[in-house]
Image: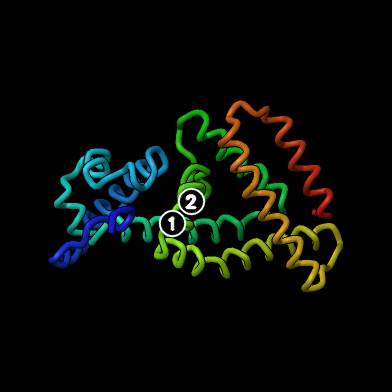
Protein backbone atom coordinates (compact mmCIF):
# COMPACT_ATOMS: atom_id res chain seq x y z
CA UNK A 1 0.00 0.00 0.00
CA UNK A 2 1.26 3.47 -0.84
CA UNK A 3 1.13 6.42 1.55
CA UNK A 4 3.02 7.03 4.77
CA UNK A 5 3.97 3.40 5.11
CA UNK A 6 5.64 3.26 1.69
CA UNK A 7 6.51 0.05 -0.16
CA UNK A 8 7.22 -3.07 1.83
CA UNK A 9 10.90 -4.00 2.09
CA UNK A 10 11.91 -7.65 1.88
CA UNK A 11 14.86 -7.42 4.24
CA UNK A 12 14.98 -6.14 7.81
CA UNK A 13 17.02 -3.01 8.46
CA UNK A 14 20.48 -3.31 9.92
CA UNK A 15 20.26 -2.62 13.67
CA UNK A 16 21.12 0.95 14.52
CA UNK A 17 24.64 1.44 15.81
CA UNK A 18 25.09 2.39 19.43
CA UNK A 19 26.76 5.50 20.71
CA UNK A 20 26.33 9.23 20.50
CA UNK A 21 27.05 9.35 16.76
CA UNK A 22 24.21 6.95 16.02
CA UNK A 23 21.85 8.95 18.23
CA UNK A 24 22.87 12.13 16.45
CA UNK A 25 22.19 10.50 13.08
CA UNK A 26 18.75 9.37 14.19
CA UNK A 27 17.91 12.80 15.56
CA UNK A 28 19.02 14.50 12.34
CA UNK A 29 16.92 12.15 10.23
CA UNK A 30 13.86 12.63 12.43
CA UNK A 31 14.16 16.42 12.36
CA UNK A 32 14.59 16.39 8.58
CA UNK A 33 11.53 14.14 8.25
CA UNK A 34 9.47 16.39 10.51
CA UNK A 35 10.36 19.43 8.41
CA UNK A 36 9.55 17.59 5.18
CA UNK A 37 6.22 16.28 6.49
CA UNK A 38 5.30 19.73 7.81
CA UNK A 39 6.16 21.47 4.53
CA UNK A 40 5.14 18.84 1.96
CA UNK A 41 2.81 16.41 3.72
CA UNK A 42 3.33 12.71 4.27
CA UNK A 43 2.67 11.79 0.66
CA UNK A 44 4.73 14.63 -0.78
CA UNK A 45 7.79 13.84 1.31
CA UNK A 46 9.48 10.66 0.16
CA UNK A 47 12.61 9.05 1.52
CA UNK A 48 14.68 10.85 -1.12
CA UNK A 49 13.49 14.25 0.13
CA UNK A 50 14.12 13.28 3.75
CA UNK A 51 17.61 12.04 2.90
CA UNK A 52 18.43 15.24 1.00
CA UNK A 53 17.18 17.44 3.85
CA UNK A 54 19.13 15.41 6.41
CA UNK A 55 22.25 15.34 4.25
CA UNK A 56 22.48 11.55 4.33
CA UNK A 57 21.88 8.68 1.93
CA UNK A 58 18.59 6.80 1.71
CA UNK A 59 20.51 3.66 2.59
CA UNK A 60 21.63 5.19 5.85
CA UNK A 61 18.04 6.09 6.74
CA UNK A 62 17.06 2.44 6.35
CA UNK A 63 19.78 1.47 8.82
CA UNK A 64 17.77 3.27 11.47
CA UNK A 65 14.16 3.09 10.28
CA UNK A 66 12.45 0.25 8.45
CA UNK A 67 9.92 2.50 6.70
CA UNK A 68 8.43 5.97 6.52
CA UNK A 69 5.63 4.76 8.81
CA UNK A 70 8.21 4.00 11.49
CA UNK A 71 9.61 7.52 11.14
CA UNK A 72 6.11 8.98 11.50
CA UNK A 73 5.54 6.87 14.61
CA UNK A 74 8.82 8.06 16.16
CA UNK A 75 7.92 11.70 15.47
CA UNK A 76 4.42 11.45 16.91
CA UNK A 77 5.75 9.63 19.98
CA UNK A 78 8.30 12.42 20.43
CA UNK A 79 5.54 15.01 20.08
CA UNK A 80 3.45 13.25 22.72
CA UNK A 81 6.34 13.02 25.18
CA UNK A 82 7.29 16.64 24.56
CA UNK A 83 3.72 17.86 25.01
CA UNK A 84 3.44 15.88 28.23
CA UNK A 85 6.53 17.58 29.60
CA UNK A 86 5.57 21.07 28.42
CA UNK A 87 1.96 20.88 29.61
CA UNK A 88 3.19 19.68 32.99
CA UNK A 89 5.24 22.88 33.37
CA UNK A 90 2.43 25.29 32.50
CA UNK A 91 0.79 27.08 35.41
CA UNK A 92 -2.55 27.68 33.71
CA UNK A 93 -4.44 27.66 30.41
CA UNK A 94 -3.41 31.25 29.69
CA UNK A 95 0.18 30.09 29.34
CA UNK A 96 -0.99 27.42 26.89
CA UNK A 97 -2.58 30.14 24.73
CA UNK A 98 0.70 32.08 24.75
CA UNK A 99 2.65 28.96 23.78
CA UNK A 100 0.26 28.11 20.97
CA UNK A 101 0.35 31.63 19.52
CA UNK A 102 4.15 31.61 19.66
CA UNK A 103 4.16 28.33 17.70
CA UNK A 104 1.79 29.81 15.11
CA UNK A 105 3.98 32.92 14.80
CA UNK A 106 7.07 30.77 14.36
CA UNK A 107 5.30 28.94 11.55
CA UNK A 108 4.40 32.26 9.90
CA UNK A 109 8.02 33.48 10.12
CA UNK A 110 9.28 30.24 8.63
CA UNK A 111 11.55 29.75 11.63
CA UNK A 112 9.98 26.43 12.53
CA UNK A 113 7.48 25.67 15.26
CA UNK A 114 8.52 23.54 18.26
CA UNK A 115 8.05 19.86 17.53
CA UNK A 116 5.55 19.52 20.40
CA UNK A 117 3.21 22.15 18.91
CA UNK A 118 3.82 22.18 15.16
CA UNK A 119 0.49 23.41 13.69
CA UNK A 120 1.07 22.09 10.17
CA UNK A 121 2.21 18.69 11.39
CA UNK A 122 -0.82 18.49 13.70
CA UNK A 123 -3.12 19.01 10.71
CA UNK A 124 -1.19 16.54 8.58
CA UNK A 125 -1.42 13.80 11.21
CA UNK A 126 -5.11 14.52 11.79
CA UNK A 127 -5.90 14.35 8.07
CA UNK A 128 -3.89 11.19 7.53
CA UNK A 129 -5.65 9.52 10.46
CA UNK A 130 -8.89 9.69 8.45
CA UNK A 131 -7.29 7.72 5.62
CA UNK A 132 -4.74 5.37 7.13
CA UNK A 133 -5.89 2.87 9.79
CA UNK A 134 -2.35 2.55 11.17
CA UNK A 135 -2.04 6.30 11.71
CA UNK A 136 -5.55 6.39 13.18
CA UNK A 137 -4.65 3.62 15.64
CA UNK A 138 -1.46 5.44 16.58
CA UNK A 139 -3.33 8.69 17.25
CA UNK A 140 -6.01 6.85 19.21
CA UNK A 141 -3.40 5.12 21.38
CA UNK A 142 -2.11 8.53 22.48
CA UNK A 143 -5.54 9.97 23.25
CA UNK A 144 -5.81 8.83 26.88
CA UNK A 145 -2.49 10.44 27.79
CA UNK A 146 -3.41 13.63 25.94
CA UNK A 147 -6.73 13.88 27.75
CA UNK A 148 -5.04 13.35 31.10
CA UNK A 149 -2.41 16.02 30.39
CA UNK A 150 -4.99 18.61 29.42
CA UNK A 151 -7.28 17.68 32.32
CA UNK A 152 -4.41 18.22 34.75
CA UNK A 153 -3.82 21.67 33.27
CA UNK A 154 -7.52 22.55 33.54
CA UNK A 155 -7.57 21.37 37.17
CA UNK A 156 -4.49 23.48 38.00
CA UNK A 157 -6.06 26.52 36.37
CA UNK A 158 -9.28 26.11 38.33
CA UNK A 159 -7.38 25.52 41.57
CA UNK A 160 -5.38 28.72 41.04
CA UNK A 161 -8.72 30.54 40.99
CA UNK A 162 -9.86 28.82 44.18
CA UNK A 163 -12.20 26.41 42.42
CA UNK A 164 -12.47 22.63 42.53
CA UNK A 165 -14.11 20.94 39.56
CA UNK A 166 -16.10 17.75 39.97
CA UNK A 167 -15.17 14.94 37.54
CA UNK A 168 -17.92 15.74 35.05
CA UNK A 169 -17.15 19.46 34.99
CA UNK A 170 -13.45 18.70 34.58
CA UNK A 171 -14.14 16.37 31.66
CA UNK A 172 -16.42 18.86 29.92
CA UNK A 173 -14.06 21.80 30.30
CA UNK A 174 -11.15 19.72 29.13
CA UNK A 175 -13.03 18.65 26.00
CA UNK A 176 -14.06 22.25 25.28
CA UNK A 177 -10.51 23.52 25.82
CA UNK A 178 -9.15 20.97 23.36
CA UNK A 179 -11.79 21.91 20.80
CA UNK A 180 -10.84 25.57 21.27
CA UNK A 181 -7.12 24.88 20.87
CA UNK A 182 -7.55 22.55 17.89
CA UNK A 183 -9.89 25.06 16.28
CA UNK A 184 -7.47 27.97 16.55
CA UNK A 185 -4.75 25.89 14.89
CA UNK A 186 -7.03 25.25 11.90
CA UNK A 187 -8.11 28.90 11.82
CA UNK A 188 -4.55 30.22 11.91
CA UNK A 189 -3.44 27.90 9.11
CA UNK A 190 -6.41 28.81 6.92
CA UNK A 191 -6.08 32.53 7.60
CA UNK A 192 -2.37 33.24 8.19
CA UNK A 193 -3.04 37.00 8.09
CA UNK A 194 -5.36 36.83 11.11
CA UNK A 195 -4.57 39.62 13.57
CA UNK A 196 -2.50 38.27 16.46
CA UNK A 197 -3.99 40.64 19.05
CA UNK A 198 -7.56 39.83 18.01
CA UNK A 199 -6.82 36.13 18.07
CA UNK A 200 -5.33 36.38 21.56
CA UNK A 201 -8.31 38.41 22.80
CA UNK A 202 -10.76 35.88 21.36
CA UNK A 203 -8.93 33.00 23.02
CA UNK A 204 -8.81 34.81 26.35
CA UNK A 205 -12.55 35.46 26.14
CA UNK A 206 -13.04 31.77 25.41
CA UNK A 207 -11.07 30.82 28.51
CA UNK A 208 -13.12 33.23 30.59
CA UNK A 209 -16.32 31.64 29.27
CA UNK A 210 -14.95 28.26 30.36
CA UNK A 211 -14.15 29.64 33.79
CA UNK A 212 -10.44 29.19 33.05
Image location of residue 185, percent across then percent down: 60, 43
Residue furthest to the right in view is 162
Who's the residue at 68% across and 27% down the image?
A: 195
> Residue 127 bears which disc, if any?
2
How dense is the environment of label 2, judged by Cα within 10 Å: few (below 14), some, or many (20 and up)? some
Left or right of residue 67, residue 202 in this image: right
Image location of residue 155, percent across then percent down: 74, 64
Say whether marks 2 and 1 touch (CB < 8 Å).
yes
Front position among marks 2 and 1: 1
Q: How many marks?
A: 2
Out of 4 and 75, give the one closest to the viewer.
4
Secondary structure under tag 2 reads helix
Q: Is residue 151 above or below residue 131?
A: below
Who's the residue at 61% across and 44% down the image?
A: 99
**Quarter placement of the N terminus:** bottom left
Q: Is residue 167 above or below residue 62?
A: below
Residue to which mark 1 is pinned: 131
How dense is the environment of label 1, judged by Cα within 10 Å: few (below 14), some, or many (20 and up)? few
Q: CA distance from mark 2 to mark 1?
A: 7 Å
Q: Kindly indicate the quadrant of the structure image that contains residue 135.
A: bottom left
**Quarter placement of the C terminus:** bottom right
Who's the residue at 46% across and 63% down the image?
A: 136
Image location of residue 33, percent across then percent down: 33, 47
Q: Kindly indicate the quadrant of the structure image that contains residue 173.
A: bottom right
Out of 179 and 17, give the one closest to the viewer.
179
Who's the residue at 16% across and 45% down the image?
A: 57
Secondary structure under tag 1 reads loop
Left or right of residue 84, residue 154 in this image: right
Amino acid sequence: MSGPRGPQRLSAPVPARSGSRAEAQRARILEAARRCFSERGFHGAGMAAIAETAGVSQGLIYRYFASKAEIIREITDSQREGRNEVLGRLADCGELVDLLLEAIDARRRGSGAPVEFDPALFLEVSAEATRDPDIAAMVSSQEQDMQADFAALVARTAAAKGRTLDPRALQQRTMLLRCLIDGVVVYAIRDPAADRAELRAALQDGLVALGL
